[in-house]
Image (cartoon, helix red, strand yellow):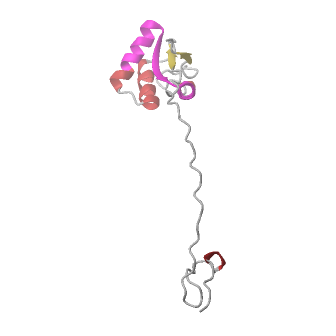
């Protein structure tokens, strides 16, 4: 009788020697267990919030503000009207609050919105700024 061929010498996928004798089992040494590092749970960092502020001027109509708020922010007609009144009475109104990048984008959209179609001599968009929320 022939001696069995060790498994590591057999072609891949073959578990018996060519003469029909089962191959010798291969003993694989156990890998040492890794010690897991304890993960410290950290609170997610709070992103600072920023307000987009719309400033009053004498060139733009309430209708312009209402349409702009609906187009850029998805506000309802009533929300747009409240913002238009606040801008008119207080000189400014917070129209949006978000993280810095999105607040800057929304400010830029206001600045690029264009002239008031309801006023023939309107020179351009309303003025808007970004300011950090206190607290």
Q: Residue furthest right?
A: 9
The magenta span reads 81-109
Quadrant assignment, res 28 = bottom right
Please name the residue shown 54% across and 89% down the image.
20
Query: Predominant secondary structure in magenta?
Result: helix
Q: Residue 37 versus residue 22: which sits nearer the camera? A: 22
- Is 2 part of what is drawn in magenta? no
Q: Position of residue 57 (x, y in %)?
A: 52, 12
State the quadrant of the N terminus: bottom right
Q: Position of residue 34 (x, y in %)?
A: 58, 46
Q: Residue furthest front?
A: 1
Q: Residue 10 versus residue 127: which sits nearer the camera? A: 10
Quadrant assignment, res 128 = top right
Q: Residue 124 versus residue 88: which sits nearer the camera? A: 88
Please name the residue shown 41% across and 22% down the image.
63
Q: Position of residue 131 (x, y in %)?
A: 55, 15
> How many discs appear?
0
Q: Position of residue 116 (x, y in %)?
A: 50, 23
Q: Residue furthest left?
A: 78
Please name the residue shown 56% across and 42% down the image.
35
Asked if residue 96 lies left or right of residue 78, the reply is right
């Amino acid at each position: 009788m022939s001696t069995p061929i060790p498994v590591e010498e057999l072609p891949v996928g073959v578990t018996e020697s060519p003469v029909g004798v089962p191959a010798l089992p291969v003993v694989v040494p156990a890998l040492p267990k890794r010690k897991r590092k304890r993960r410290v749970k950290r609170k997610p960092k709070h992103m600072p919030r920023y307000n987009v502020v719309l400033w009053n001027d004498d060139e733009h109509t309430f209708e312009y503000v209402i349409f702009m708020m609906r187009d850029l922010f998805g506000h309802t007609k009533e929300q747009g009207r409240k913002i238009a009144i606040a801008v008119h009475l207080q000189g400014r109104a917070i129209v949006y609050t978000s993280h810095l990048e999105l607040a800057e984008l929304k400010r830029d959209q206001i600045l690029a919105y264009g002239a008031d179609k309801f006023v023939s001599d309107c020179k351009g968009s309303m003025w808007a700024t970004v300011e950090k929320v206190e607290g």
